[in-house]
Image (spheres, grey):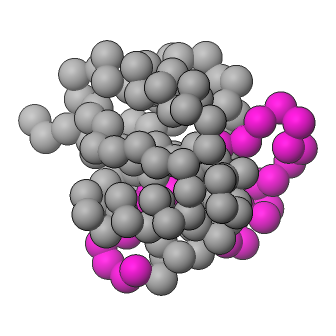
Amino acid sequence: MSKIGIVIVDAQQLIRAGFSLILQAQDDLRVLGEGSSTADAVALVERHRPDVVLVASTLADGDGFAATERIRALGAPQPCIVVLVGSRDGDLGERARAAGADRTLGKYAIPEQIVAEVRHAAAVPR
């Protein structure tokens, strides 16, 4: 069985580490790389061609929406992009979808929800 490849991009190292620990504990999931900026997101996707990208709505050099647009401009193969939102971000679902993201997920989600969301995202045909 091949593992679901994941890239995590968030300006906060603690968030990246937490998501990585949760996801790496699963036999079918593999974190391929982590970054903190739009530039990191694009470079990691180009290098690893992950199945799923978890990208925060706020990054070190901009936002996850610009990162999403740049990833979509890379062409095929395309990952499923999940924008991570904080509790203070409000409803960013519409803005995320307009940028090309497939889904949104709260950074405050419980581990089981994070794992389920990544598996579901990977199953979406691209």
90 in magenta: yes
x then y, percent, for residue 88: 88, 36
Q: How many marks do you count on the picture?
A: 0
* Left or right placement of residue 74 versus residue 82 in this view: left
| x, y percent for residue 26 | 30, 20
For the C terminus, give its image quadrant: bottom left
**Residue 99 found in image quarter:** bottom right
From this viewpoint, is residue 123 visible? no
* Magenta-colored stretch includes residue 85: yes
From which residue to which does the magenta span run?
A: 74-99
Q: Is residue 79 above or below residue 53?
A: below
Which residue lies at the image location 77% right of the left edge and 36% below the top edge?
Answer: 86
> In x, y percent, where is residue 66?
65, 70
Between residue 75 and residue 61, name the one nearer to us.
61
- Residue that appears at 89% across and 44% down: 90
Determine if residue 6 is in view. yes
Residue at 78 percent across and 64 percent down: it is 95
Task: Reply above or below: 5 against 26.
Answer: below
Tell me the residue at 28%/32% (across/down): 29
On screen, residue 21 versus residue 68, left or right, reads: left
Residue lying at the far left in this picture: please name it.
Answer: 1
Q: Quadrant of the N terminus?
A: top left
Residue 97 x, y percent position in the rendering: 69, 65
